[in-house]
Amino acid sequence: MFEALTERLGQVFRRLSGRGRLSERDVDEALREVRLALLEADVHYRVVKTFTERVRARATGAEVLEGLAPAHQVVRIVRDELTQLLGGRAEPLRVDPPWPAVFVMVGLQGSGKTTAAGKLAHLLRRQGRRVLLVACDLQRPAAVAQLEVLARQAGVDFFGVPGGMTPPDVAKAGVAHARRGGHEVVVVDTAGRQHVDEALMAEASHIVEAVQARQVLLVVDAMTGQDAVNVAQAFVARMRIDGIVLTKLDGDARGGAALSVREVTGAPILFAGTGERLDGLEPFHPDRMAGRILG
Ligand code: GDP
C-alpha cells in the first residue's frame, strides 16, 4: 500500500545523502519534498503540517547539521517522528484475567469487521486462548452465518441466537455461555451500517455496556482514504473506542489516510488487516511500519 510513498521518500533521502555537509536550506528543501510526498500519499494535511514541523525543529539544529553524517541523522529523525505519528509503542490487547475478557468489534458495514472478528479469534486461539465468537450483527442477514463459518475455520467456539433477542441480550447471553464454558476471551461482532448514525452508535454502546467490554475495537477500512479518518473521528467523538483495527492494508489505495488515523483520533492502532484470509491480521508495531514505509 505504501510503495509509491516509499519510492518517493527514498529518492529524497538519496539526494540528501549525496550532499555531504548540509545547510538549513538543504534540509528545508528535502522537507518540502517529504511534505509533497506525504500529501500525494493522501496523508491528512494537518498531520503533514505538524509532522514536518516536528522534524524540522529537530533536524535543523547545529547538532545535526554540524555533526557526522547529517543526512543519516535527518533520516533517523524522520523515522522517529513517523513512529511517533503511528503511536510510538505497540499497544497490546488486554487479554489478562479476570476472564472472560470481552472484546467488542464496531465499525461500518463492509469495513471488514466480521472478518476481523474471525481473524482476532484465530490469532488468540493460536496463542493458546479459549475463544468464543459471539454474533450480534443482526442487521446483515448473512453476518451470523459468516461468523459461524469463520469460527469453524479458526477452530474456536461460536455463539449465536436464531432470532427474537436484542443484540445486547445476545451479547450478554454469549458472555454467560463463555463463563459456563471456561472461555478466556469473547469476541463480539456487532452490526455495521452504511454511514455513522445515532442508531448504530446507540446499539454498539448498549452492547459495550451490557457485556462490560474489556476493549472496544473500531474496524476501519484503510482503502477508503480520508473517509477512513472521518469515520474514525466520528466514532471516537461519540462512543468509547479503545483501539483501532486498520483493515485492507494489502490493498493498492494510496494508504496515507491510514497513517493519519492515530494522530487525528488519538486512539491507538492495535492491529493491521493484511488480507482476506484468517491469518491476515498482525499486531500493529509503529516502529516496524515506519521502517517499512521508509524502506
Ligand atoms: P463487515 O461488513 O464489516 O463485517 O465486512 P466483512 O468482514 O464482511 O468484509 C468485507 C469484505 O472485505 C470481504 O470481502 C472481506 O473478505 C474483505 N476484507 C476484510 N478484511 C480484509 C483485508 O484485510 N484485506 C482485504 N484485501 N480484504 C479484506
Image (cartoon, rainbow, N blue to C red):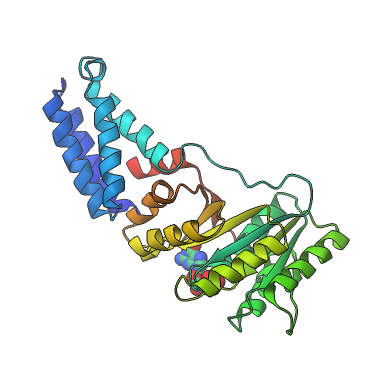
Can residue 232 be seen in this snapshot? Answer: yes
Q: Residue at x 64, y 61 (%)?
A: 104
Q: Residue at x 22, y 44 (%)?
A: 35
Which quadrant: the C terminus?
A: top left
* Position of residue 219 measured from the top left corner of the image (x, y, whole percent): 52, 61
The vertical placement of 19 against 261, above or below, is above
How many marks overall?
0
Left or right: residue 76 compared with residue 179: left
* Position of residue 70 measured from the top left corner of the image (x, y, whole percent): 23, 22
The vertical placement of 241 against 263, above or below, is below
The vertical placement of 170 against 15, above or below, is below
* Position of residue 109 measured from the top left corner of the image (x, y, whole percent): 50, 73
Which residue of the protein is positioned furthest toward the right in this rendering? Answer: 180
Left or right: residue 107 compared with residue 21: right
The vertical placement of 196 against 39, above or below, is below
Can residue 225 be seen in this snapshot? Answer: no
